[in-house]
Image: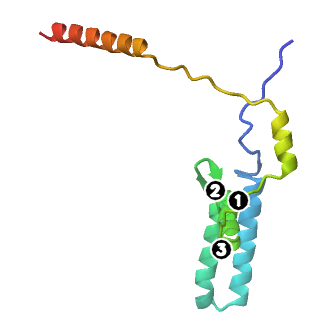
Amino acid sequence: MQFRVPQFIDVEDKIFGPLSFKQFIYLAGGAGLVYIIYKVLPFWAAILPMLIVGGLAVLMAFYKLNGKPFIFYLQAGINYFFSKKLFIWKQRLVKQDDKKKEEGVPQITTVVPMVTSSKLKDLAWSLDVQEQENNRRLQ
C-alpha cells in the first residue's frame, strides 16, 4: 500500500490572493493603525508614526531573517527589553536526601589506558621510521 507524503509543509496556504492569512492580518492591522493615526494627528505630525507603523507591518508580513519570520525577532527583542538583566549566580546546596539518592545510583567510570614506556618507545620508533622514509623519498 502506498501513501502520498505531504510536501512543502512549511509553506503557508495563500488565502487572500498572493497573501497568507497571517500576512493579510499584519497588513490589514497596519493599514488600520495608519488610518487611525492619519485621522487623529495633523498630517505633518502623523508622517513619522505612519511610516514606522507601515514599515513594521510590511516587515512582519514579508521579511524573514535566517528563515524565521520577523515577528519572532520582534517578540524576542520586546521580551529582552522588559525582562531583568541582572543575573546572579547562586550556588545550589545539595540536601542530604539528594546525596543519599546519588549514592544509590551506580557511578559510571571511564577507563583511560595508561601509556607505558614500552608503548611510548614503540610510537617514537614508528614515527622515526616514517620520518626517515619521507626524507629518503625527498632526496
Label 1 packing within 10 angstroms: few (<14), some (14-19), many (20+): few
Contact, mark 3 vs mark 2 (Cβ under 8 Å): no
Residue corresponding to mark 3: 53
Q: Is residue 126 above or below residue 89?
A: above
Q: Quadrant of residue 60?
A: bottom right
Label 3 packing within 10 angstroms: few (<14), some (14-19), many (20+): some
Which residue does the image show at 75% across and 69% down from the upper left?
29
Residue corresponding to mark 1: 91
Label 2 packing within 10 angstroms: few (<14), some (14-19), many (20+): some
Instruction: Please give the count of numbered marks on the rendered protein.
Output: 3
Residue 109 falls left or right of residue 6: left
Q: Which colour style is shown?
A: rainbow
Q: Nearer the viewer, residue 29 or 74?
A: 74
The image position of residue 43, as x and y in percent, is: 62, 89
Give whichever of discs 2 and 1 has the lower sequence position: 2
Give whichever of discs 3 and 2 has the lower sequence position: 3
Amino acid on which the number 2 mark rests in the picture: Phe
Q: Nearer the viewer, residue 63 or 135?
A: 135
Residue corresponding to mark 2: 62
Mark whose residue sits in front, 3 or 1 = 1
Which residue does the image show at 78% across and 25% down from the upper left?
5
In the rendered view of the protein, which quadrant contains the N terminus?
Answer: top right
Which residue does the image show at 24% across and 13% down from the upper left?
131
